Amino acid sequence: MLSTLEPSYNHFGWDPTNSPPEGAQKKAQIEGKRGSKCPVIIAVSICSVVNAAVLSAVVCMWVELEREVEELRRSHLKLQDQQFQHSGTGGLNETALELAVEKHLTDLRDREEGTMWLPTDRETSFGNMSHRTHKPTAHLTGSPQINSLAGDDKGLSKIKSWEARQGLATLANGMRHKKGHLIIPTDGLYFIYSQLYYRFLNPKQTQSKTYQLIHYTFKQNSYPKPLQIMKSARNTCWSKNVEFGLYTSYQGGVFRLQRGDKIWVAVSNMSMVCLEETSSYFGAFMI
């Protein structure tokens, strides 16, 4: 009777009844690790693809936005050029021509009167050709020059010797000064103010005396008679024991003025007014 012989694997170095050799175990471990890393690799790949797509979309949107902004800028510049040119003639339009004429006339007038012109948005901005942001302004300061105008029958003297060109004095945006008058260039509401500094030198061995100090502001328009718009007055008695008698009078108010109106200051006892630039001054500005 033939016996079934079990195949022998001894010559291969491995017995089926025994555990797998060490090389096979390592191979199985490597395969297991590879299998566990596959989901992570797939997730990372998907994230990379999504990020690349988002970045590409953002870049495209940014390029398109820059293109639209550039087109808007060119259209705006073209519109500005058209505002300053006649259609097909290349000349200045009416608004720019009026501005040039006004500026030229103002320069001539200011050169004669000693005024200065401050920049306005009509000169610095293309889009606001019809609005003036800088308003007429004047601040005149006292000057030691002798006032040549004689007083009237009431003993009042118009102050003529205001300083309009140097030091702290200012004339701007069309405001003019002529022989003590401020000449208004534009209709509107104006704040008018003035201050006078009285200083009386008391001679020795002189009895005390009472002085009447009156401070007026007048306005004159097309009517021949001037209109009094402000007044301040005081009776002052200085002691004979003091070397100087000092007094300051200030007045100010808001008034509606028209183009061409003239305003000026008049005083009593003109010889007692100290015309220092920081003590006696007169001005107006549009509000």
Image (cartoon, rainbow, N blue to C red):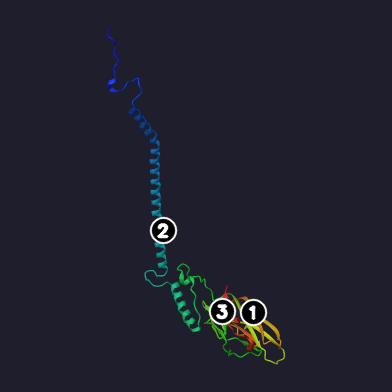
| Direction from residue 253 to residue 119 in the image, left or right | left
Q: Which residue in the protein does label 2 denote?
A: 69
* Image quadrant in which the C terminus is located: bottom right
13, 245: nearer the viewer: 13
Q: Position of residue 114 (x, y in %)?
A: 50, 82
Q: Which residue in the protein does label 3 denote?
A: 139
Q: Going 44% across and 76% down the picture, which residue do you hit?
A: 100
Q: Can you name the residue that lies furthest to the top here?
A: 1
Considering the numbered disc 2 on the image, is that residue within a helix, a strand or a loop?
Answer: helix
Mark 1 vs mark 2: give the one in front: 1
258, 51: nearer the viewer: 51
Res 231 → quadrant: bottom right
Res 35 → quadrant: top left
6, 205: nearer the viewer: 6
* Image quadrant in which the N terminus is located: top left
Marked residue nearer the N-terminal end (1 or 2): 2
As shown in the figure, which amino acid type bears the numbered disc 1? Tyr
Q: Which residue in the protein does label 1 denote?
A: 250
Q: Going 39% across and 34% down the picture, which residue do you hit?
A: 36
Mark 3 surroundings within 10 Å by alpha-carbon count, few (fewer than 14), some (14 through 19), many (20 or more): many
As shown in the figure, which amino acid type bears the numbered disc 3? His
80, 202: nearer the viewer: 202
Q: How many marks?
A: 3
- Vertical position of residue 172 compared to residue 41: above or below: below
Q: Gap in Å between the C-alphas at discs 2 and 3?
A: 47 Å
As shown in the figure, which amino acid type bears the numbered disc 2? Val
